[in-house]
Image (cartoon, grey):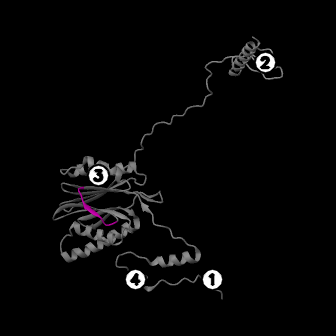
Amino acid sequence: MLNITPNLQAPSQSLFQRNSTGFNFDNRERDNQLAEREGFIPKPPTTTGSTVVGIKYRDGVILATDRQGTADGRITTNCMKKIYRLQENIYAGGSGVCGDLHQVARLTRAEMDLHQLQMGCKVPVVCANHFVKHMLYRYQGNIKITMLIGGVDNGGPSLYSTWFEGSTTKIPFAAQGSGNCAALPVLEKGWNASLDEKSAESLAIDAVRSGIRNDLYSGSPIHICIIRTDYSVSLYDKIFAGIPVPRPPVLRVKPQPPKVLFAADHTLEPIANSMHSLPPESDQVVPKGTRTALALARLKSKKIKETTEIDG
């Protein structure tokens, strides 16, 4: 009996064991074999554009993101999750490759749960940030995500901005994602250390709204997370319909033939009958007043003058 099943080697047993980092690479060996035998090219990972904003105000921290998901430049969903719960007092908003973002958030939450069991109290915000930045630094930028980690602990509200290569900064406000260039100026203009919750919430919404209007990969609605110093949390969506930017009308000029300002009529006469005639063998016709006629007249007068001088 003929066996037409492709002879693909079974993945090694070590690949099926759960990796300690939380990432699963079971299909990598299979894809390599398919690429060698049948020309299969696996689809590369796609990044999602987003606008993520974090603000530390007087009584807590606010995280706000858009909820539009994109792949290959196309809008795929308007309800994508970009804010993750790491602990009761710690939340994170991220942008980048969707699969990496979900996996890092899930792994960070599991590690913080274990840390809370060992400590017996609420986990400080800096612990979650340390775990994320060490993981991103260990992978040397291959995990393409950026995260804003915010929360409250015994030291008060804290906000950390962590980038894909592992660098981190503790700052009072931050913006990440593809719409950060439009959101950051709004934060720089409106933030101050004495903001109350209502003013900080309005500022975060305005910053995300600016990112949505100026970034093709960001979209509504806006997802908001408020973490207060009394450890209460509010999560809700604010529906925002993008207002199209008015554009000036296109100036269209109808093509018209050129206008004739003036016209001069020049009669044509045979050169033999004209005042400035050429030799009799010439059949050319030259209009009066043209450069050719004037040049011929000058040439004729010059010849007549030379002839008169020689005769004299």
The answer to which of 221 and 118 lies nearer the viewer is: 118
Classify 10 Å Cα crowding around label 4: few (below 14), some (14-19), many (20 and above). few
Q: Position of residue 262 (x, y in %)?
A: 63, 18
Question: Is residue 196 placed above or below 110 in the rendered structure?
Answer: above
Image quadrant for the C terminus?
top right
For residue 204, the mark is 3
Q: Which residues are magenta?
A: 165-172
Q: Callout 1, which amino acid?
A: Ile
The dominant secondary structure in magenta is loop
Q: Residue at x 38, y 55 (%)?
A: 178
Could you tell me if residue 104 is visible in this image? yes
Could you tell me if residue 53 is visible in this image? no
Magenta stretch: includes residue 169: yes
Q: Residue at x 43, y 76 (%)?
A: 25
Q: Quadrant of residue 77?
A: bottom left
Q: Quadrant of residue 264?
A: top right
- Rounded to the nearest angstrom, the CA distance separating label 1 from label 4 is 30 Å
Q: Position of residue 172 (x, y in %)?
A: 23, 56
Q: Callout 4, which amino acid?
A: Gln
- Rounded to the nearest angstrom, the CA distance separating label 1 from label 3 is 60 Å
- Rounded to the nearest angstrom, the CA distance separating label 2 from label 1 is 96 Å
The nearer-to-camera label among 2 and 3 is: 2
The nearer-to-camera label among 4 and 2 is: 2
- Rounded to the nearest angstrom, the CA distance separating label 4 from label 2 is 106 Å
Q: Secondary structure at mark 4?
A: loop
Name the residue that disc number 1 marks: 4
Mark 1 vs 3, N-terminal side? 1
The reply to whether the C-beta atoms of the residues labelled 1 and 4 are less than 8 Å apart is: no
Q: Callout 3, which amino acid?
A: Ala
Name the residue that disc number 4 marks: 17
Mark 4 vs 2, N-terminal side? 4
Name the residue that disc number 2 marks: 271
